[in-house]
Image (cartoon, helix red, strand yellow):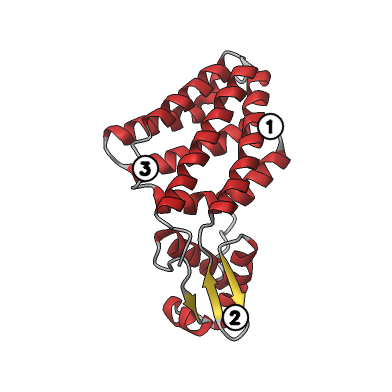
Amino acid sequence: MKHQDVKPQSNTQRAVQELRQMIFTGELPAGSDHLESELAVQLGMSRTPIREAALMLESQGLLELRPRKGVRILPVSPEDMCEIYDVLTELESLAARRAAERSPSPAELQALAQAIDDMENALTQHSLEDWAEADERFHRELVRLGGNSRVQSIVAMMSDQVRRARAVTLFMRPLPVKSNEDHRRVFEAIRSGRADEAAFVHHAHRQNAKKLIIDLLEKHKLSRV
């Protein structure tokens, strides 16, 4: 059987991917201004894909396009994070409840269990970057197990801003041992079909995460330029 050729990545797709990475790593820091022509030279492409990528990233809340001034990388706002976490808390808690009500099989729960194991191993290895990746995987898989495609779409829309805030504060927070314990409790509640407990534990977990992130942003004035 003939394999279908994989389409090469367009310049616009590459620009979106590389600009996102530069924003998340801080190479393009919050509050900084950049001309489209400068970014085009930096990425080795014309201004058109840079402009198209900037429009997409603007819709995701990562930057803003300013007439004759290029792009400005948006800061992580405590106010924005408060609103985002409030929505995530409710939607993910609903997903945890629905997942428990569905009584998923051990095979269906494997990815969630693996994410928890990976988070625990990451802390043992003192790798916060690996922990953050596994934590993101846990939340994504939890929402998927909830089985509501609209919840998945809304949560995915907000994931970039959460990832940015976490990247900024990751090395300032205490070791997330309690976070791992919460994830394990949510998993056990889902596996045992205890829907109320799954929703309650996850709701409290997300509210604690919200307070931690916002306190760090405000304490270190990381939303300011």
Q: Nearer the viewer, residue 135 or 164?
A: 164
Q: Residue furthest front?
A: 219
Q: Is residue 63 above or below residue 69?
A: above
Which percent across, then down, holds residue 114?
Answer: 44, 29
From the top left corner, tell me how far across and down residue 175 is, in percent: 33, 36
Residue found at x 57% / y 25%: 108
In this view, the residue farthest toward the left is 125
Residue 49, image quadrant: bottom right
What residue sits 69% from the left and 40% below the top? 151
Q: Circle 2 sits in a helix, a strand or a loop, which is it?
A: helix
Residue 96 lies left or right of residue 32; in this view the side is: right
Percent of width and height locating residue 107? 54, 23
Whether residue 109 can be seen here? yes
Left or right: 21, with 206 as reference point: left
21, 175: nearer the viewer: 175
Label 3 and label 1: CA atoms lie apart by 32 Å
Residue of label 2: 48
Amino acid under disc 3: Arg
> Which residue is more in the foreground, 219 or 71?
219
Q: Amino acid at mark 2?
A: Thr
Q: CA distance from mark 1 to mark 2?
A: 39 Å
Residue 106 spot, x, y in % from top left: 54, 19
What residue sits right under mark 3 in the picture? 173
Q: Label 3: how many residues lie within 10 Å, few (<14), some (14-19) or many (20+)?
A: few
Q: Which residue is rendered at x = 49% and y = 38% of the image? A: 209
- Circle 2 residues within 10 Å: few <14, some 14–19, many ≥20: some
Tell me which numbered mark, 3 or 1, is placed earlier along the sequence. 1
Q: Is residue 79 left or right of residue 163?
A: right
- Contact (Cβ within 8 Å) of mark 3 with mark 1: no
3 vs 1, front mark: 3
